[in-house]
Image: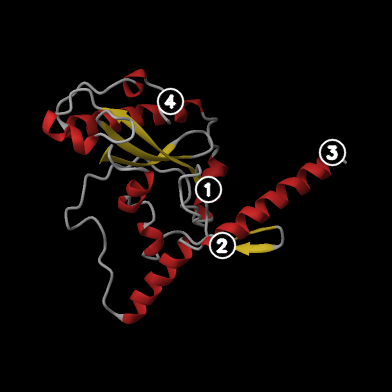
Amino acid sequence: MIGSFDCMYWQWKNCPTGWAGEYSGRKRMPTIILEAVASYDTWIWHAFFGMPGSCNDLNVLAKSPLFDELTAGQATQIQFQVNNRIHNLGYYLADGIYPQWATFTRFSIVRGAACGWDRDDLRYIMLTYIILHNMIIEDERPDDSDEDLESDEEEDNTMRPRLAQVWEGPTGEDFDPVGIDGYYFNGFMDRYDAIRSANSHSNLQEDLIEHFWNVQGNMEI
């Protein structure tokens, strides 16, 4: 389980009148969306901020770079076994709006309405509080011993939480291009389909539920 995944809608109090329609959605007020992934101790290691509030969580996910490394074949390979079945993709905890594919901060300024006028200023404010949030989480964590750090390096563990990232929109240099070579393109499409496999999603869900009940039953015995 890689992390918990969700979106937060930050009200934009001083949104220019001409943009109000674009930034207003089901909440009927201008908002800017933050998509974030947090680890088990609420460390935020992925942040995608800036989409207008007229979008929903699925629209944001479609624009988000969250799965770019995975589809490009650059992510760490994962394999684990649950309920005697092998799974080859990590998974996120998410609510019911997301398809069947295989509020994070503690500062009141983010819970209240944004009073800035400029979107870039709001982006810097959000990133600042994500960094401050992670600094607090890091300070509250138990210290890693030298042996733990050496062990992580030996195992080439690249799944440790990363600093928050903010995507500022397409610039033409954000992503590695998908090559026109058939071999690489086919690999890209295979990974793309694997991420969106409803069958894998159902299998994993069933295996996790079965595993949970087996563990609970053994604990009661």
Residue 186 position in % (x across, y down): 38, 76
Q: Residue at x 41, y 23 (%)?
A: 106
The residue to which callout 3 is attached is: 220
Lower sequence index among marks 3 and 4: 4
The residue to which callout 4 is attached is: 136
The residue to which callout 1 is attached is: 150
Q: In the orientation shown, which residue stands out farthest toward the right? A: 221
Cα–Cα span, label 2 and label 4: 36 Å
Q: Is residue 102 left or right of residue 59?
A: right
Q: Quadrant of residue 43?
A: top left
Q: Secondary structure at mark 1?
A: helix
Q: Secondary structure at mark 4?
A: helix
Of the two numbered discs 1 and 3 in the rendering, the one whose residue sits closer to the viewer = 3
In the image, residue 85 sits, relative to residue 36, either above or below, namely below
Lower sequence index among marks 4 and 1: 4
Q: Name the amino acid type tagged 1.
A: Glu
Of the two numbered discs 2 and 1 in the rendering, the one whose residue sits closer to the viewer = 2
Lower sequence index among marks 2 and 4: 4
- Count residues near mark 4 (Cα–Cα under 10 Å), then give few for <14, some for 14-19, many for 20+: few
Cα–Cα span, label 3 and label 4: 37 Å
Cα–Cα span, label 2 and label 1: 34 Å
